[in-house]
Amino acid sequence: MVFAAKNAEIPEWGKKLVEVEGQSILLVKTKGAVYALERECPHQGAPMEGAFLKEAGRISCPRHGYRFDLATGACEDRPEFTLRVYPVELRGDDVYVEIG
């Protein structure tokens, strides 16, 4: 696990783009839960920092609206597309992400 950010830096129902071991990782927080995911949509590479958070545990691609489960990366609209997610661990106010 590698330090990624302070939990307080990620807005509730918001996103924060960070660099972890040379990779751009998007941190997302909904209802106090923090998730880490790849920066680009697996469909056509749209930047997920422009994605929409309309319900807890789900994120919608800004380009075509495909919805992804933040815990598993599964796309309910198109099962052939899976968003890469990374394990997250909270240690106090520190957010750690496992890359690799």
Image (cartoon, rainbow, N blue to C red):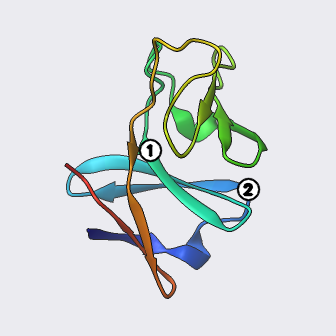
- Is 63 positioned to the left or the right of 47 in the image? right
**Residue for badge 1:** 37
Assign the N terminus to one quadrant of the image.
bottom left
User: Residue at left 74%, top 62%?
Assistant: 31
Q: Secondary structure at mark 2?
A: loop
Where residue 97 appears, x then y in whole percent?
34, 62
- Tell me if residue 90 comes above or below residue 45 in the rendering: below
Where residue 95 appears, x then y in whole percent?
44, 72
- Tell me if residue 74 comes above or below residue 56 in the rendering: above
Towards the viewer: 99 or 9: 99
Query: In whole angstroms, how far apart are the C-alphas of marks 2 and 1?
Result: 15 Å
Q: Amino acid at mark 2?
A: Trp
Towards the viewer: 82 or 39: 82
Determine the image quadrant of residue 60: top right
User: Residue at left 51%, top 84%?
Assistant: 93
Where residue 91 appears, x then y in whole percent?
43, 83
Q: Residues within 10 Å of mark 2 (few under 14, many from 20)?
A: some
- Tell me if residue 39 comes above or below residue 27 in the rendering: above
Determine the image quadrant of residue 68: top right
State which tag comes first along the sequence, 2 or 1.
2
Q: Secondary structure at mark 1?
A: strand
Q: Amino acid at mark 1?
A: Leu
**Residue for badge 2:** 13
- Is 99 positioned to the left or the right of 90 in the image? left
Determine the image quadrant of residue 20: bottom left
